[in-house]
Image: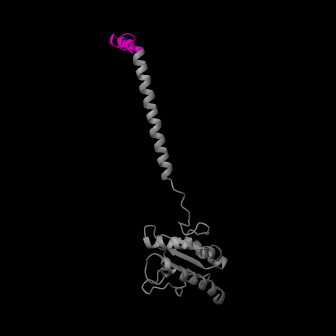
Amino acid sequence: MYYIFRLISNHQFPCCIEREIMLHSTLALSLLLIAVSSNLAMAIKKEKRAPQTLSRGWGDEITWVQTYEEGLYQAKKSNKPLMVIHHLEDCQYCQALKKAFAENEEIQEMAQNNFIMLNLMHETTDKNLSPDGQYVPRIMFVDPSLTVRADITGRYSNRLYTYEPQDIPFLIENMKKALRLIQTEL
């Protein structure tokens, strides 16, 4: 150690010492950059979410249509009712209903097998889908003759087509009613 200090202080072999210091500095800087970029990559990986599906959390096993027009076409073609769910991502009532809807096996099975399903996060141009106002959550049924079933309502008089998580049994009955009406009326 003393020898190296004497070399530095006497300025003997300055190019070798400068090269060694530069090599150590470069190596330290490289290791620092690798550590930072590795941590950044891990943070980005954690932030990545699963790709958004058309279900938007309402039921990944259900086949969902993209647009109201596609839903009407599929309902007529398949002779199944269209179930339209109006909701917003930042609505706590929508989130609570979505959770209850997605966790209920009977709803999921009926939705997958007996309905054309659409969930909308925006209003449609069809004013028949908002006969008592534009609020969320709102669930409406359209039969294969493309008639909006204003007679299939929830249990609230001030918002006829809304459902809450505790209304899941009532929603199941309304889904069954929509299926019965197809058999008796069409």
Q: How many marks?
A: 0
Q: What is the x, y in percent for residue 11?
A: 35, 11
Q: Quadrant of residue 64?
A: bottom right
11 or 177: nearer the viewer:
11
> Magenta part mainly helix, strand or loop?
helix
Colour scheme in use: one colour
88 or 9: nearer the viewer:
9
Seen in the picture, residue 136 relative to 15 is either above or below; the reply is: below
Residue at the spot x=63%, y=74% of the render?
A: 109
Among all residues in the image, which is located at the extreme front? 2
Q: Is any atom of residue 16 visible in this view?
A: yes
Seen in the picture, residue 53 relative to 157 is either above or below; the reply is: above
Among all residues in the image, which is located at the extreme left? 9
134 or 139: nearer the viewer:
139
Residue at the spot x=66%, y=77% of the render?
A: 78
Q: Does the magenta stretch include residue 11?
A: yes
Q: What is the x, y in percent for residue 55?
A: 56, 67
Q: Is residue 124 magenta?
A: no
Q: What is the x, y in percent for residue 173?
A: 57, 84
Q: Quadrant of residue 180?
A: bottom right
Q: Give the range drawn in magenta.
A: 1-15
Name the quarter where the N terminus is drawn.
top left
6 or 88: nearer the viewer:
6
Q: What is the x, y in percent for residue 85?
A: 52, 75
Q: In which quarter of the image is residue 142?
A: bottom right
Among all residues in the image, which is located at the extreme bottom? 184
Residue at the spot x=43%, y=34% of the render?
A: 32
Name the quarter where the C terminus is drawn.
bottom right
